[in-house]
Image (spheres, rainbow, N blue to C red):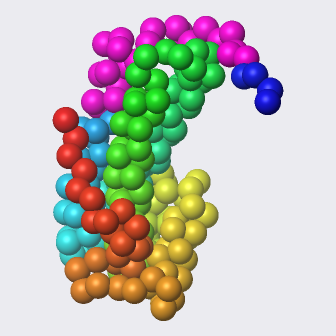
Amino acid sequence: MKQFTALDWDLSDIFSGIDSPAYIQFKQQIGARLHSLGQNIEVVRAATPAPISEWSSCLRQLEQLECDIDHLQSYIICAYCSDPAAPGIQREYGECMPLDAAKEQLTGRFSSGLSSLADGDFDSLMQHQKISPVGYHIERLLARSEQQRDSPAYPTHSTHSSSEADYHKLTGALEFEMR
């Protein structure tokens, strides 16, 4: 069996460690932003007529959270590769999974909200100045939501979209509490 050789990476320009105040603050901010965005998405989904600028804002927040969570996970993976025996690295990676899962849940809520927009509202959203560069991404979210809604493989429930139903089925309806 081949022996794993740790990589010699200096990650201190990102965070000085998983116990550093900057790392802890970054992770806590992600949790708080996920919670806030969840509330915002529910407000936007319930609003009539559809508030296009708020939909745009939610999408941009969702995309930024995805980047930040990816950044956090990449940092942990690189820290592990640099020092596999470092205390807490594997635990820390596991602790980041609920953040990623919560982001996926919000993506499902956002997508199901998109699929419920009237055609005119959806067209207005697509033409919004801050959305047009990511229009393809939105169209894919909508198509995925509609495909899942119409597929017998994704049973729907009266209170959840198809993607949320599938998400809850896979996770056992886990509730995520952010510290």
- The answer to whether one can see residue 99 in this image is yes
**At 26% from the left edge and 69% from the top edge, which residue is drawn?**
45
Residue 89 higher or lower than 32, as above or below: above
Region of the chain picked out in magenta, as a range: 5-29
Vertical side of 1 occupied by 44: above or below:
below
Q: Residue furthest right?
A: 2
Q: What count of labels does the image hold?
A: 0
Using residue 6 as the reference point, say whether residue 153 is left or right of it. left
Left/right of residue 141 with respect to residue 33 in the rendered view? right
Question: What residue appears at the point 30 percent right and 22 percent down from the top-left corner?
Answer: 25
Q: Residue at x 40, y 29 (%)?
A: 92
Report the residue at 45% width, 83% height from top: 154
Q: Does the magenta run of residues contain 131? A: no
Instruction: Report x, y in % for residue 59.
Output: 41, 54
30 and 46: which one is in front? 30
In the drawing, does residue 7 fall left or right of residue 163?
Answer: right
